[in-house]
Image (tube, helix red, strand yellow):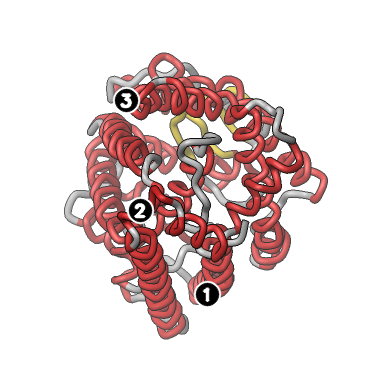
Amino acid sequence: MHGADSFNVALNSPHMQDTLPAPLLMASLFAAAVTISLLTRLWLASRQMRHVARHRNAVPAAFAGTVGLAAHQKAAAYTLAKSRLGLLEMAFGTAVLLGWTLLGGLGALNQAVLAVLGPDTAPLVSQLVLLAAFALVGGLLDLPFTLYRTFVLEARFGFNKTTPALWLADLVKSVVVGGLVGLPIAALVLWLMGSAGGAWWLWAWAAWMGFNLLLLWLYPTFIAPLFNQFKPLDDETLRTRVTALMQRCGFTAKGLFVMDGSRRSAHANAYFTGFGAAKRVVFYDTLLAKLSPGEVDAVLAHELGHFKHKHVVKRIAGMFAMSLLGFALLGWLSTQAWFYAGLGVNPNLNDTPNDALALLLFMLAIPVFSFFVSPLWAQLSRQHEFEADAYAVSQTSGHDLSTALLKLYEDNASTLTPDPLFVKFYYSHPPASERLARMTGQALPA
């Protein structure tokens, strides 16, 4: 059913007569939030592009002796190319969002699923099919941007190493894993929504949190190896250094592994994954090829700093709290006819279940409003990075950490001259200039 028709049906239903303005208010509020967030994002992107372009022809003084002009200009060109693509994705994504909601696309998809499956299909099955159909359509809509980013933009700057065959294999695996992992938890949440009474959202939240903790354990052991090869770190000298550092920091892990990141990209990274006894340290092979042993130590110490300061636990606790609020809000909104009608869907609160529709509408609407508080989370993340840097400097060489960061910024073509306001709004990691400036007073002798 199209948006205008579903909106009129909802308004004319007896249930809605006493709250006539509510759907219109919801639609107006949502449209205003979409418009303001879009204009804000466009403004920030334009600031970033102008700032980077304005400084592309001169390396900042703080990096003049360590970063060449060619590398600086490559980073600027890469940033601008990604920003232009981001502008297109932003405009397209907004159009798709409005199509799903105010223009009635989600309601139309739901009606199409019901028509194909027929009236005898179990409600839970039809709702799972709706979720799968929505994910499929969304994936197809995003596909051109994904292909362009991988095989045109990343290839242009020498980063893409994946082949079409490998990319397709990854896509198939992602779809299969997504179905095997996502459908069971979706079925459980939908079942709780329909069977657990008014407090279903609390039970669903508990199930969702348990599922996420389970994934932290499953991912490194069973899921990640489906996409990449993980081999034990066989460089005995480096292994000895890394093991000594971890012991000095009081950290234990299940193993030290090297991942074949070079099969897909020239970007370099290192990370911890897993939870509890399943924690493991993973180095990209590209990282080990570019950094000295001392620099690897420093990068690892930075990651250890996140654990020392309990950043991971704090983020999980924050995720628990925010998801609890989200499920509570969803529990209330799912019973409000104006929530559906205001977002282009005809609710049948006393007839067929609307649980999958409520989930999808919530997933579509919440990012629009949470956008305005996202700078707070970005600021918290940057503060965590500063704390991890300080810990790394206290455990290894500040000089090694500085040179490692510069190599990673250069090899990943990260701009050294981002717009300060863009940084405050989006950056989860501080720009290189801020990180290195803080290290200057803390760095140990080289």
Please state the horizontal and vertical placement of residue 5, each as a whole percent of the image. 57, 62
| Separation of marks 2 and 1 at Cα, in angstroms | 19 Å
Q: Where 345 sits versus 128, above or below?
A: below
Q: Residues within 10 Å of mark 3 (few under 14, many from 20)?
A: some
The N terminus: image quadrant: bottom right
Q: Do callouts 2 and 3 mark residues in contact (Cβ within 8 Å)?
A: no
- Residue at (32%, 50%) from the top-left corner? 399
Q: Which comes sooner in the sequence, label 2 or label 3?
A: 3
Quadrant in the rendering for residue 70: bottom right
- Residue at (47%, 49%) from the top-left corner? 361
Please state the horizontal and vertical placement of residue 109, each as a whole percent of the image. 65, 50
Q: Quick one: 120 or 420, which is closer to the camera? A: 120
Quadrant in the rendering for residue 272: top left
Q: Amino acid at mark 3?
A: Ala
- The residue singled out by tag 2 in the image is 428
Q: Amino acid at mark 1?
A: Leu
Q: Where 286 sits versus 320, above or below?
A: below
- The residue singled out by tag 1 in the image is 80
| Separation of marks 1 and 3 at Cα, in angstroms | 48 Å
Q: Residues within 10 Å of mark 2 (few under 14, many from 20)?
A: some
Q: Is residue 305 visible?
A: no
- Residue at (46%, 58%) from the top-left corner? 12
Q: Amino acid at mark 2?
A: Ser
Q: In this image, 289 relative to 295: left or right?
A: right
- The residue singled out by tag 3 in the image is 199
Of tags 1 and 3, the one toward the viewer is: 3
Q: Quick one: 291 or 1, which is closer to the camera? A: 1
Q: Residues within 10 Å of mark 1 (few under 14, many from 20)?
A: many
Please state the horizontal and vertical placement of residue 440, each as a whole percent of the image. 22, 57
> Which SS class for mark 3?
helix
